[in-house]
Amino acid sequence: FTELESDQIARFQEYLRIHTAHPSPDYAGAAAFLLPYAASLGLHTTTLHLTPCKTKPLFLLTWPGSDPSLPSVLLNSHIDSVPAEPEKWAHPPFAAHRDPATGRIYARGAQDDKCLPVQYLEAIRGLKAAGFAPTRTLHISLVPDEEIGGVDGFEKFAESEEFRALNIGFMLDEGQASPTDVFRVFYADRLVWRLIVKAAGAPGHGSRMFDGAAVDNLMDCVEAIASFREAQFGMVKAGKRGPGEVVSVNPVYMKAGIPSPTGFVMNMQPSEAEVGFDLRLPPTEDIEQIKRRVKEEWAPAHKNLTYELIRKGPVTDVAGHPIFTATNESNPWWSVFEKAITSAGGKLSKPEILSSTTDSRFVRQLGIPALGFSPMTNTPILLHDNNEFLEDKVFLRGIKVYEHVIRALSSLQD
Ligand SMILES: CSCC[C@H](NC=O)C(=O)O
Ligand SMILES: [Zn+2]
Ligand SMILES: [Zn+2]
């Protein structure tokens, strides 16, 4: 590695060592790292507080363009991470240990998405060193709380006067790692719903066989959903649909039983049971059809089942259309992005729908185009997993990719 590359890896590790995981992300620690770092590159820094408590700051880093009348470019990344179970990791999740043999840097957030701001900033360093000056203003946003739904993060930011004043024309946000040597890009997120099903039933002795026990009723629901899930997953396994192009419905908790000092009472069949599902729909999926299915097939009242179907986030954009970004000639940003990847020596996969959800949805909802992109090729998908890592060389190549991408996007003429 050159001295610059070693420094870039060290800065990535330094950011990874800040404990930004929920339930108590160290946003002040992140500020202490990010703000002086951005200022040292000559960027303007602003801190926004979108909540009265002031414990969830949002940082804006700005590189002014020569023509501030043109819509600007936004590069987003969330500061927070999901928690980690240290005892299940080969290396401590906040040590950012670099394995000298493989170059893998192990840390919670290595892929999701603490590589991004360091890559954005190092790309800017490279562009400045090359004497490049942007035409359009470039903003970097570092936002809190993405991992818990963005209610006090990007959702509030997107509704704010400060956001409107930025006059954003296009946004890049996180994507997902690619196990092959092709870069992945995402033009939509699936819609997030939660389904909670509660069963009631006859209680009785643990030894008695009878119909209509609560857990028995709940199992009917679980089995109906499992067969729907098999059919959807089958299309993914057969390669007919991408993972974001089907409806996913995964059980995330189950609750039943009568607690006892040593666990649960083992000889009583309970009169109540409950199961929760994470439900995700492609943006064009007909929710009415799913609602009918829940009512008639998954949780019918005649089986003593009741349910709540809870929508998380927007289902259409401000014009009432499904929320996605065009990836054809109608969107000039798409063409510029595509060409930038080629000029960086990369290949781009067919644009995909992301199976999870990002802050992009709040921007697309406003009718502003946004793409999900994390430049990680030949990398296993480890977001939210144990032993999350990113290889140093992959991280460094990402910086080069962003140099091309930022150069192209910030130079787009109308
Ligand atoms: C209710 S929005 C939740 C957002 C979250 N984002 C990352 O994992 C997700 O579950 O996809
Ligand atoms: Zn993320
Ligand atoms: Zn995540």
Image: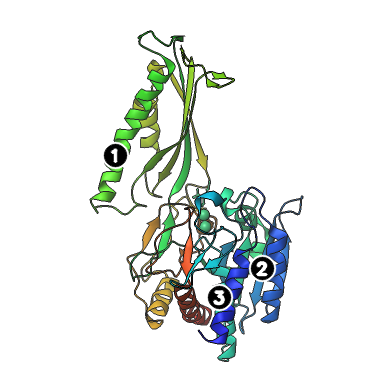
Q: Nearer the viewer, residue 389 or 131?
A: 389
Q: On screen, 167 above or below 135?
A: above
Name the amino acid type tagged 2.
Answer: Leu
Q: Position of residue 147 (x, y in %)?
A: 56, 51
Q: Amino acid at mark 1?
A: Glu
* Disc 3 and disc 1 in contact, CB within 8 angstroms: no
Q: Element type at marker 1?
A: helix
Q: Looking at this view, name the residue that lies furthest to the right.
A: 53
* First of labels 3, 2 by sequence position: 3
How far apart are the alpha carbons under marks 3 and 2?
23 Å
Q: Given contact means CB atoms under 8 Å apart, are the residues at marks 2 and 1 in contact? A: no
> What's the residue at 48%, 15% (across, down)?
270
Task: State the mark number for residue 230.
Answer: 1
User: Mark 2 or 1, which is nearer the eye?
Assistant: 1
User: SS class of the residue under badge 3?
Assistant: helix
Q: Quadrant of residue 107?
A: bottom right
Picture quadrant of residue 157: bottom right
Residue at 36%, 60% in the rendered image: 352
Task: Give how far apart the Cα atoms at labels 2 and 1 are.
Answer: 44 Å
Residue behind mark 2: 60
Q: Which residue is mark 3?
A: 9
- Amino acid carrying label 3: it is Ile
Going from the N terminus, do you reach mark 3 or mark 1 first? Answer: 3
In the rendered image, which quarter is residue 185 located in?
Answer: bottom left
| Nearer-the-camera pick, 54 or 111 | 111
